Image (tube, rainbow, N blue to C red):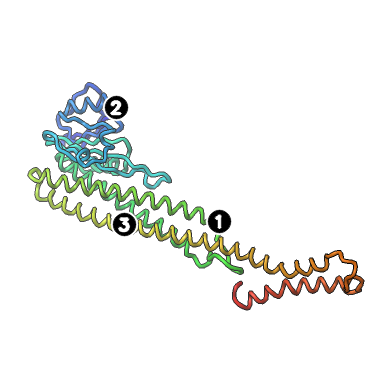
Amino acid sequence: MITVHTRVDGRVVRQPLALGEALPPDAVWIDLLRPDEEERAHVGALTGCDLPTRAEMREIEASSQLYTEGDGVYMTSPIISRATSPHPEQGELTFVLTPRHLITLRYTEPLPVITFAARCVRQPELLASSETALFGLLDAVIDRVADVLELVGGRIDELSTRIFDDSLDSGGFGKAAKKPDELQDVLRGIGRAGDLTHKVRDSLAGLDRLVVFLTSVSGGRLTKDQKTALKTMTRDLRSLNEHAGFLAHEANFLLDATLGLINIEQNAIIKIFSVVAVALMPPTLIASAYGMNFKHMPELDWEYGYPMAILLMVLSAVGPLWYFRRRGWL
């Protein structure tokens, strides 16, 4: 699917571009969403750019992601999409900057591209030139990354509250232990938060390389305000990367804490079995002694033998429990 954004009489017009059609004369931004080979070749022929294939976009070498060819600057970075869903996605977004056009090539639908397209309709000055369009789109991408980090931070705070809630403290008698299903749900939440944080850090690393490369190859084409904007983007990306590292550390800390709680739960269960086994050992010994089938046993014909044996077994069971309680082991 090819969408062309054109400035006409001070307003932005979005229109699809079919195969065989020529570009509108005032086209600024050309967006390709999941293009097939014919669409990619058609836009390449109209703009004089050799657009990368999807396999080339996925290559991790810096020389394959950031390079110049003719008058075009080719830049690819991983971008997060569907960040609020249970299964966020990460796909590559390629920017091709030429003197006349900005070309974006993508196989996912990241929210910044959609929001920037809507903003262009309200603010046509965002498409004053291909450079202006690129800077506006990069700014939207960075803002979205910041929003995702805020989302991750909120999830981690919620998980921390659930883990360290005193009313749900685990272990021991007389305390409400956390339910296994709750701990499993917390582990899933930590895993999702950690996975999203790693995706954000990967995206931030790609965007940081992209901004540095753009600064080095297009300095002569940029205005003073655009150069200042690039420096601001660099500072924002580095501060966001530090915050993402902090959130990743917090996720690992919560994972260790949750695993520690699970270990305490298991120890409490084992302790219960151990106490029960120790408490039943003396009654078992007494019952075994009086269960022997010898002919001559002193208490065999005693009228109070059976009640005395029951009393001895009860006392021998209560005695260890009282001792453990006194020592603070229960």
Question: Residue at (56%, 63%) from the top-left corner?
Answer: 267
Asked if marks 3 and 1 touch (Cβ < 8 Å), the reply is no
Q: Is residue 116 left or right of residue 132?
A: right
Labels 3, 2: front one: 3
Q: Which residue is mark 3?
A: 245
The x and y percentages for residue 4 are: 23, 32
Q: Give the CA separation, mark 3 to mark 1.
A: 30 Å
Q: Earlier in the sequence, mark 2 or mark 1?
A: 2
Q: Which residue is mark 1?
A: 180
Q: Give the CA separation, mark 2 to mark 1.
A: 48 Å
**Secondary structure at numbered mark 3:** helix
- Residue type, mark 1 in image: Pro
The x and y percentages for residue 107 are: 31, 35
- Residue type, mark 3 in image: Gly
Displayed quadrant of residue 133: top left
- Residue type, mark 2 in image: Asp
Q: Earlier in the sequence, mark 3 or mark 2?
A: 2
State the quadrant of the C terminus.
bottom right
Q: Residues within 10 Å of mark 3 (few under 14, many from 20)?
A: some
Asked if marks 2 and 1 touch (Cβ < 8 Å), the reply is no
Q: How many numbered markers are drawn?
A: 3
Q: Which mark is residue 238?
A: none
Q: Give the CA separation, mark 3 to mark 2.
A: 37 Å
